[in-house]
Image (spheres, rainbow, N blue to C red):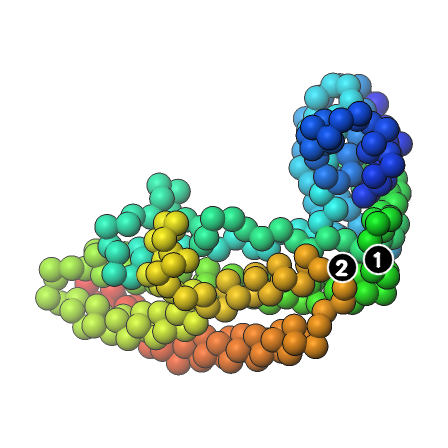
Amino acid sequence: MLIFLLPDRLTASSPKLLSQACQSFSALERIPHGAPLNYYLKSAPKDEVKLIILDDKGQTVRTLKGTKQPGINRVRWDLSYEQTKQVMLRTNPLEYPHVEVASEGWQPLGRRRPSGPRVAPGTYTVKLTIGEQEFTKNLIVKKDPPSARSEQSIRAQLKLLLEIRNNINSVVDIINQIELIRKQICDLKALLKGDANTKPVITTGEEPDKKLMDVQDNFFDLRLTGGIQDTLRWPDKLYTRLMKLAGYIGQSDFPPTTEQLEVHEIFKEKLETYQSQFNELLDKYLPGFNNLLRRRISTT
């Protein structure tokens, strides 16, 4: 099997090269943003094909799934870091029990996952992996020529955006853990319903469920149904506020403002508080509930 990473055809954010590639504005609109990563395969491999983007420190920026058709393959990198993690809601919205969870057993929070922040100008390494084989080639990302911002301001912006992305991922981790626990409690209550002997288990399980909901309610409104009216009915909470802060910062050509940095610190303190509350719940309430459940099981 012959594998070869082809030379770059297009540097990032290069209007001159784009104008040479197409002669009309309508054609320009159809060109996807980012860097095309091209590679040639003599035959289709059995192993998975991945393209890993590394920064100048060797840290993974993005991992892309590659195609494996014989001949020339092309995967486009949008010059962004990895997306934030996926929220997986497994319980019904509060006050809307008729809104059922999707057949997959979970549904997303909101209509889309935010993309990762745009990378800073510099030299990146593209690593093509097929099984145990690896092939690398450098890729240069240049600053958009019309942009007036300096590379220093770009890196200051990127540093903050990566911190916010990490905070969003921490929020998602807490939400997903809570959803898993609450779903198990909900299923257990449905299974034991009608059995008088198991009433203490159901009653005891209601307390941690309520406290988990109190923590979860800091991140998003538990009445969200996924409908288009959600944004009008219910206020934004920490999860959405973090995404909006990242959006406001990322769309600017300038470094973060003093006010944005202050808001970031406020959100970070809130997250630390909610994380502590969640950890306390895990340590204080769930062990007792699990022990009660084990005793009931052992006596049946």
Q: Residue at x 62, y 51 (%)?
A: 115
Q: Residue at x 57, y 62 (%)?
A: 244
The residue wearing badge 2 is 253
Task: Report whether 119 appears left or right of 279.
Answer: right
Query: Label 2 is placed on what type of residue?
Result: Asp
What kind of element bears circle 2?
loop
The residue wearing badge 1 is 148
Q: Position of residue 177 (x, y in %)?
A: 45, 63
Q: Nearer the viewer, residue 30 or 157?
A: 30
Q: Position of residue 236 (x, y in %)?
A: 45, 65
Q: Residue at x 77, y 19 (%)?
A: 71
- Identify whether 58 is placed above or below 273: above
Spatial separation of the CA atoms under disc 2 and disc 1: 7 Å
Q: Residues within 10 Å of mark 2 (few under 14, many from 20)?
A: some
Task: Report whether 161 appears left or right of 169.
Answer: right
What kind of element bears circle 1?
loop
Task: Report whether 205 appears left or right of 176.
Answer: left
Q: Residues within 10 Å of mark 1 (few under 14, many from 20)?
A: few
Q: Quadrant of the C terminus?
A: bottom left
Q: Position of residue 64 (x, y in %)?
A: 69, 41
In contact (CB < 8 Å): disc 2 and disc 1: yes
- Identify whether 253 is placed above or below 283: above
Residue that lies at the very extreme toward the front in this rendered image: 25
